[in-house]
Image (cartoon, grey):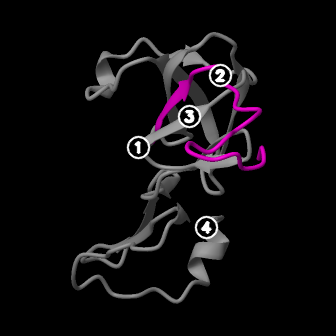
């Protein structure tokens, strides 16, 4: 704001702590008047209040996960993971991942890899995909899949025990 703009603002007397609760971009301006009536203006740098994490989604074979997931899921074929992230306020600074075969409890102990496209799984085994998203204000959000067990078994015919039932 220019000095002319500041002279035309309706100022609110400072009587208590000013709280900013809503996320957004702010500049705080202060008008200071000394005992002789001299006026000075000061302002803060741009303040960004971004208290929520990014929206992170991991998807594979028609399933989608956000947040830290648990449980197990069996699959019988190779698959790709796709990661998406949005942050409407400060934007996304980085997306990183770690593909593990065991549960990780300390996210700081992981050697993260920059995400640059789909992550392919072609080998039979157990997999958990961990994702770390850092927004423009360095706020970190984590997400993971449940344990995905790629066992390679395909059931093509099924015959109930003890009978001559039809194949399913």
Give x and y (percent) for residue 140: 44, 39
Task: Single out the mark in the foreground, 2 or 4.
Answer: 2
The disc, 2 or 1, on the residue closer to the chain's N-terminal end is 1
Q: Considering only vertical position in the picture, is 89 above or below 21?
A: above
Residue drawn where x is 78% and y is 48% of the image: 166
Whole-Å distance between the Cαs marked 2 and 4? 47 Å
Q: Are marks 2 and 1 in contact (CB under 8 Å)?
A: no
Q: Circles 2 and 3: CB distance less than 8 Å?
A: no
Query: As displayed, is residue 50 above or below residue 104?
Result: below
Q: Where residue 121 sits: x, y (%)?
A: 66, 17
The residue carrying mark 4 is 3
* First in residue order: circle 1 vs circle 4: 4
Q: Please give the range of residues in magenta.
A: 140-168
Q: Which mark is residue 71?
A: 1
**Magenta segment includes 132:** no
The alpha-carbon separation of the residues under discs 1 and 4 comes to 60 Å
Callout 1 secondary element:
loop
Tell me the quadrant of the picture where the N terminus can be found.
bottom right
Percent x, y of residue 39: 42, 71
């Amino acid at each position: 704001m220019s000095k002319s703009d500041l002279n035309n603002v309706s100022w609110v007397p400072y009587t208590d702590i000013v709280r900013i609760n809503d996320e957004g971009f702010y500049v705080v301006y202060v008008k200071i008047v000394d005992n002789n009536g001299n006026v000075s203006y000061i302002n803060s740098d741009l303040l960004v209040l971004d208290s929520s994490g990014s929206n992170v989604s991991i998807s594979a074979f028609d399933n989608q996960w956000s947040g830290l997931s648990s449980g197990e899921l069996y699959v019988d074929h190779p698959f790709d993971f796709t990661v998406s992230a949005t942050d409407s306020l400060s934007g996304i600074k980085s997306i990183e991942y770690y593909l593990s075969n065991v549960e990780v409890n300390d996210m700081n102990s992981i050697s993260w890899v920059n995400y640059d496209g789909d992550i392919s799984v072609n080998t039979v085994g157990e997999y958990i995909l961990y994702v770390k998203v850092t927004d423009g204000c360095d706020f970190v959000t984590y997400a993971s899949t449940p344990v995905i067990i790629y066992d390679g078994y395909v059931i093509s015919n099924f015959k109930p025990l003890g009978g001559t039932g039809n194949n399913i």
